[in-house]
Image (cartoon, grey):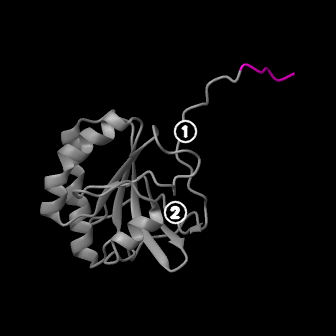
Amino acid sequence: MALGTVLRTPVGRHRPPPDAYAHWRDGTHCLPFFLEYDTGSQTLGRVEAKLPGYAAFVTATSTRPALLIHTRTESRAQALRRHLTAPARDLGLTIATSSADFTTTSPWGPWWSPLTNNTRRTTLAGLAALWPHLTPAGGLEHTDADTPLTLPVPPLPPTGEEEE
């Protein structure tokens, strides 16, 4: 399992402003994706308003990466799923959500829920298998090749044992 290229670059005319872009590889599976880290500070409508930018990118570049949205809470992820399912379908976007309520320091685990009916949470490799039509985004500048992906994780509760 390896995480490929992580990008943190300004976006151009047909590039949406994601928080990151990466390729996840696991054996023969490759999942190219944009990552949106949703803190909950924007309205659902504002998050939805970003989707046409992703659709324009897909159309302009003839590539098809997924959009993974990671939120702080599962209730926010569920609200996004309800709000984004129809627009994502109408725009032809492939989206999955997850939240810090599920993920650990291993974001590739079975935490991701695609915005499709009757689909259970799955791993990044599972998303790649579910979405074989995805293709890497072209024309992006690599700034942090082979940087591990670490999602913000809330601190663990105290164990009761103090360090000396």
- Residue under label 1, please give it: 153
Magenta span main SS: loop
Q: Give the x, y percent position of residue 103.
A: 50, 45
Residue at the image point whose x is 18% and y is 41% from the top: 45
Residue at the image point whose x is 36% and y is 60% from the top: 11
Residue at the image point whose x is 34% and y is 55% from the top: 120
> Quarter of the image holding residue 20?
bottom left
Residue placed most toward the observer, 95 or 57: 95
Label 1 SS: loop
Amino acid at dot 2 = Val
Residue at the image point whose x is 39% and y is 77% from the top: 138
Label 2 SS: loop
Q: Give the x, y percent position of residue 96.
A: 33, 55
- Number of numbered callouts drawn: 2
User: Residue 162 magenta-drawn?
Assistant: yes
In the displayed structure image, the side of residue 103 where residue 44 appears, left or right? left
In the displayed structure image, the side of residue 72 where residue 162 appears, left or right? right
Task: Name the quadrant of the N terminus.
Answer: bottom right
Amino acid at dot 1 = Val
Mark closer to the observer (2, 1):
1
Q: What is the number of the mark on residue 91? A: none
Task: Name the quadrant of the C terminus.
Answer: top right
Q: What is the number of the mark on residue 6? A: 2
Q: Determine crowd level at label 2: few under 14, some 14-19, many 20+ residues with C-alpha closer than 10 A.
A: many
Q: CA distance from mark 2 to mark 1?
A: 19 Å
Q: Give the x, y percent position of residue 56.
A: 21, 66
Q: Which residues are magenta?
A: 160-164
User: Residue 154 magenta-drawn?
Assistant: no
Q: Give the x, y percent position of residue 64.
A: 31, 73
